[in-house]
Image (cartoon, coloured by chain):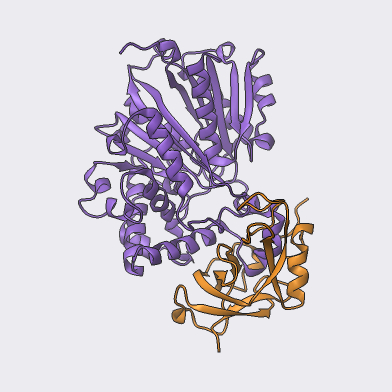
Amino acid sequence: MSASPGPRDTSAIIEPYLAAIAERRIVLPHCDACGSFHWYPLPRCPGCGSAGWSWREVRPQARLLTWTMVAHAFSPDLAGKVPYLVALVEPVDAPGVHLVTTVVDCRADELVIDMPLVADFRVPVWGEAAMPVFRPPG
Amino acid sequence: MSRNADRVPVIAGIGESRFSRRSASPLRDLQSAAIADAISDAGLSPEGIDAVYTESALMPNLYPIDVAEAAFGLGSLRRRGYFSSVGPGVALAVITAMEGIRAGDISAALVYFGMDWGSRGSSAYDFHRKYESKSAVEHPYGFYAQPTYFALMARRYAHEHGITADELTQVLGQIAVRQRASAALNDNAQQQDPMTFEDYLTSRMISDPLRRDDCCLLSDGAVALVVASLARARDSRHRYHAELLGGGHASTGMTEESCMTQGVAYPALPAAKVSAERAFAEAKIKPDDLSFVEVYDCFTISVLLQLDQLGVCGPGESRYLFAAGGAAGSGQLAVNTHGGLLSQAYILGANHITEAVKQVRGEAGRGQLASAEIGAVQLAPSADHATLILARAT
């Protein structure tokens, strides 16, 4: 079977994340024992091995780790969509978690690594539903 | 110090298909020919093989061990096994064979790996579709293909080490140009046309800061190796033999789906450091003893990320190896003497191992280094890393 890539092919383990973003909230796996976050969801906390972790909401604030402007369409579906920006951000409440996202309402030449960002919820370049995107505060 | 040549592991035989963008032959034919060549190059016959090892992400579909076993009449195997995925999996197969020779558990192991992503161009990207989390939370943003993963690493790396955009372009371009120059000396390289720095600059942007010429090729091709004892290798036609002095493997503790974005030291590769330290400790040599290193170069930035961990320089300093007067420029440490994944072929680092064997044997043709007594192979990038150290033996 050659399923097309995209948000349809979701798995049960990521479902709580998707359900939360449908409510414009960001939740991440948080260990009840050691208090660390991890990403992507695992059967046990990779920090301490505890099986007791749960989804915890984080504030919609992050810092910009890095970004790239994608110029090449890696799939025919993306041909009309390049160039587009992909970023990695680290939520302020969840150090060590790196979310794949994009930055909006900001020109690429205004981006500064480690700059603070806040979340918004919009349909990303290859998405079908609103997902967390990030923009400069204010 | 006398040593028992029956327990000294060497890569006694190598076989390589023709590497090309699209082969006229199916992968099974390329792989079969490479296996036959490797066994012959070792001076053995199939009956002498008593172990078969390969990697586990691609080979179970493309060329399973049972096919190798049946096709070559390998009827009395003592060991068989699939190791971790892609390049590090091939290296771990070699490490396991090395240990088997040292222990006297096996007498000769066949290790093989092949690729048909040249014919099936989208397969490189599809490789990551199998991870459902990636489909759910990465693909909607267009975070889909490996150049984008490494472009993000490159920009963060430059920031952390105070490298300006222009300086990054200079060093990445140097790596691309030098590897092309090496490929021009390699009759089995896909890209032998010369590349100037100006050519590099004008190659189109793929995912900034990475241009087309920062990205590896796509290839069809197959490689095979035979790991045996030095005593056996001495019966082959070769004057010099490629002794396996040491091998180090280290896992990142991350899953395959998270290892490209979630590293604790992102974008640094601490597991690459651990694997190198394990290999050097076993080999009882220092990084400064190396004449050359064949390093996994899916993208130019990958060369810097891994050389930073090899022990030849400090973190963020590998770029100086490529500067005028730096080790790579002055011939003190040759890097990717075959052209690498960037300009020879994308055989996921299996071709790095065969090149290292050719260099220490003195059989690298026009690309032969004047000094190639000790070299390393450094393979990534996935949820694990591996380092091999080879040395010339007689």
Across and down, in percent, residue B387 comes to 44, 37
Quarter of the image where the N terminus of chain B is located: top left
Q: How many marks?
A: 0
Quarter of the image where the C terminus of chain B is located: top left
Of residues B370 and B100, which is closer to you in this image?
Answer: B100
Looking at the image, the residue that sits furthest to the front is A33
Can you tell which quarter of the image residue B71 is in?
A: top right
Of residues B72 and B132, which is closer to you in this image?
Answer: B132
Across and down, in percent, residue B297 comes to 44, 48
As displayed, is residue B18 above or below residue A39?
above
Q: Is residue B131 left or right of residue B237?
A: right
Across and down, in percent, residue B138 comes to 64, 64
Of residues B55 and B236, which is closer to you in this image?
Answer: B55
Can you tell which quarter of the image residue B192 is in?
A: top left
Looking at the image, the residue that sits furthest to the bottom is A138
Q: Residue at x 35, y 56 (%)?
A: B316
Q: Is residue B83 visible?
A: yes
- The colour one sees for chain B in the rendered image is purple
Q: Is residue B196 left or right of residue B220?
A: left
- The colour one sees for chain A in the rendered image is orange
Q: Is residue B344 visible?
A: no
Q: Is residue A10 left or right of residue B239?
A: right
Q: Is residue A60 left or right of residue B265?
A: right
As displayed, is residue B207 above or below residue B55?
below
Q: Residue at x 58, y 47 (%)?
A: B253
